[in-house]
Amino acid sequence: MKKLIDGIVEFRNKSLEQYREKYARLAAGQSPDTLFIACCDSRVVPNTFASTNPGDLFVVRNVGNLVCPCHNHHENEVDQSIGAAIEFAVCQLKVKDIIVCGHSECGAMNALISNSQLDVQLPNLFFQRWLKHAQPALKKYQQGFRIKSVQKQEIHNEISQINVVQQLEHLKTYSAVSKAILEKKLRIHGWWFELSTANVFYYDQTNHHFVLIDEIGAHKILQKNGH
């Protein structure tokens, strides 16, 4: 708590003035162009590695950056928080892009592999139920599905990348998403953040591999997406 309080004081003393006008404008309403679905891991900070400002991203964070599928579009089978965020972002905010961002050394992926509990003293009822939305990624790995990579990844990181691809498939089960994609009003993307290098990779859906987002990679990505 002390670190947070000190951070607020530092923000007031050093940065508030330059943000005051922006926040005043944002108070009238938000118009982010991207829904960003990320893991709630404390080491993953989208606004830092993507250099975004307040108002740029509509962010959803949960354990394992999961999107529970909307089977047959039955809303009673959907986690209401995720469903509401997707619906609000697509239908109300009219975001142009949705990004699902996974990361290396993900605790949720390690737990998925080992099927172990975080703490034997805890029932982990909600944790285990939540992880079922990542089970298809593990199953694909066990059946031999692999994503092309220029470097050998550890198993939990390979599954983390497959999980990103799997969650993109889950996104398409939402009628609001599939309709917007069909009407070419929405694009969905998979990203993967490598903690040890702070590199960000983009999933190339055509060639089925993750591409480093450097100057060369960024140019190709933007061209492919019509920018």
Image (cartoon, grey):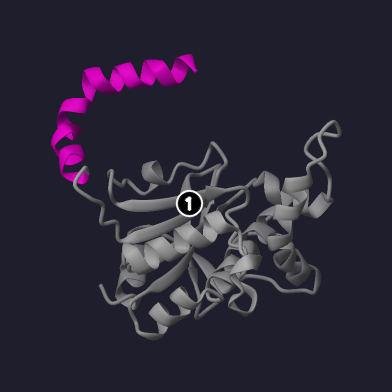
Q: Amino acid at mark 1?
A: Val
The answer to whether 167 appears left or right of 2 in the picture is right
Does residue 8 belong to the magenta stretch? yes
Residue 67 lies in quadrant: bottom right
Q: Residue at x 58, y 74 (%)?
A: 169
Q: Nearer the viewer, residue 180 or 188?
A: 180
x, y (%) of residue 10? Answer: 30, 18
- Residue 72 position (above or below residue 83): below
The answer to whether 127 appears left or right of 65 in the picture is right
Residue span colored magenta: 1-26
- Residue 99 position (above or below residue 23): below
x, y (%) of residue 23? Answer: 20, 38
Q: Residue at x 86, y 34 (%)?
A: 120
Secondary-structure class at tag 1: strand
The answer to whether 103 appears left or right of 184 in the picture is right
Q: Nearer the viewer, residue 107 or 120?
A: 120
Q: Quadrant of the C terminus?
A: bottom left
- Residue extending farthest right: 120
Residue 195 lies in quadrant: top right
Q: Badge 1: few (under 14), some or many (20 or more) residues near its Cα, within 10 Å?
A: some
x, y (%) of residue 37? Answer: 49, 56
Residue 166 lies in quadrant: bottom right
Asked whether residue 191 appears in the rendered view, the answer is no
x, y (%) of residue 110? Answer: 74, 48
Q: Residue at x 33, y 68 (%)?
A: 96
- Residue extending farthest left: 21
- Residue 28 position (above or below residue 97): above
Q: Nearer the viewer, residue 111 or 104?
A: 111
Residue picked out by circle 1: 60
Q: Main secondary structure of the magenta part?
A: helix
The answer to whether 206 appears left or right of 69 in the picture is left
Q: Nearer the viewer, residue 199 or 191?
A: 191
